[in-house]
Image (cartoon, rainbow, N blue to C red):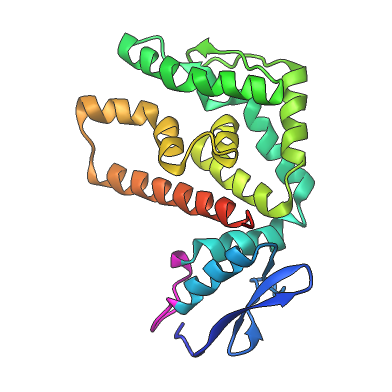
């Protein structure tokens, strides 16, 4: 689709800030007005639209996509999404350690245990750790605590949390990113710890390189989305 608009601007709307193209509001795929709670986020979304030239390429507008998802999907399916995200605590990546080789197990312990300890203190919700892939039951009280934490997120932050949790396979890593405990690079490194270890030993093919680059970019975009939601 070709760009036909000339002027991109932000404007105050009911409940927040919107983006206009030649005076017409940007709308979501479901035809709702794209309105976000932060002026900074609206400005960044406007910049995405202004950068489209000559063609509009949705894949280059991750902030727009996240905002539209929050408006169209998260608001309508909130209970389902809260449950989906909270359920990751029951099988979180950081709880499953390798038995061999010892070097990998040591690296997992060094990186992941700090996150588990942080989350246990932050949310009063400890998680059990196991070696191997056989599921380990988690405390019902801890699972309830994480569900309560996730349910407290507004639609925009919940959308971002869902995106990072799914990308990383870890609610603990996603919460650490949201809380500023990890930045985007550290969140990617933590979630890709096993893969990175294997690459160091055996190398990486082109397809894996592209896949990991896409995952890293998704995490960076979502981290920026969260940051822009914070008004300064």
Q: Provide the major secondary structure of the magenta segment.
A: loop
Q: In which quarter of the image is residue 118?
A: top right
> Is residue 7 visible in the rendered structure shown here?
yes
Q: In which quarter of the image is residue 70?
A: bottom right
Q: Which residue is drawn at 63% across and 53% down?
A: 230
Q: In this view, does 161 lie above or below 1?
A: above
Q: Does the magenta stretch include residue 55?
A: yes
Q: Which residue is drawn at 30% across and 42% down?
A: 208
Q: Is residue 112 magenta?
A: no
Q: In this view, does 210 lie above or below 26?
A: above
Number of numbered discs:
0
Q: Quadrant of residue 21?
A: bottom right
Q: Is residue 78 above or below residue 106?
A: below
Q: Where is residue 24 in the image (x, y as percent from the top left)?
A: 65, 87
Q: Which residue is drawn at 64% across and 27% down?
A: 89
Q: Where is residue 177 in the image (x, y as percent from the top left)?
A: 54, 39
Q: Where is residue 63 in the image (x, y as percent from the top left)?
A: 54, 62
Q: Position of residue 45 (x, y in %)?
A: 55, 69
> Is residue 101 visible in the rendered structure shown here?
no
Q: What stretch is highlighted in magenta?
A: 51-60
- Of residues 174 and 11, the one nearer the viewer is 11
Image quadrant containing the C terminus: bottom right
Q: Which residue is drawn at 49% across and 73% down?
A: 47
- Of residues 228 and 116, the one nearer the viewer is 228
């Amino acid at each position: 689709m070709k760009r036909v608009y000339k002027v991109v601007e932000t404007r105050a709307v009911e409940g927040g800030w919107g983006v206009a193209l030649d005076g017409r509001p940007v709308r979501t795929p479901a035809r709702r007005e794209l309105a976000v709670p932060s002026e900074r986020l609206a400005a960044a979304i406007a910049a995405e639209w202004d950068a489209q030239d000559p063609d509009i390429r949705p894949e280059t507008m991750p902030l727009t996509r996240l905002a539209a998802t929050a408006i169209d999907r998260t608001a309508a399916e909130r209970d389902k999404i809260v449950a989906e995200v909270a359920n990751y605590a029951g099988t979180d990546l950081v709880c499953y350690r390798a038995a061999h080789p010892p070097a990998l197990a040591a690296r997992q312990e060094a990186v992941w245990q700090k996150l588990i300890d942080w989350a246990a203190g932050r949310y009063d919700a400890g998680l059990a750790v196991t070696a191997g892939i056989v599921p380990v039951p988690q405390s019902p009280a801890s699972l309830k605590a994480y569900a309560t934490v996730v349910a407290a997120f507004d639609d925009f932050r919940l959308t971002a949390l869902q995106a990072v949790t799914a990308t990383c396979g870890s609610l603990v890593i996603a919460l650490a990113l949201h809380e500023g405990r990890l930045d985007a690079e550290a969140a990617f490194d933590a979630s890709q710890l096993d893969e990175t270890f294997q690459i160091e030993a055996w190398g990486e093919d082109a397809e894996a390189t592209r896949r990991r680059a896409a995952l890293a970019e998704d995490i960076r975009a979502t981290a920026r989305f969260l940051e822009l939601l914070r008004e300064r």
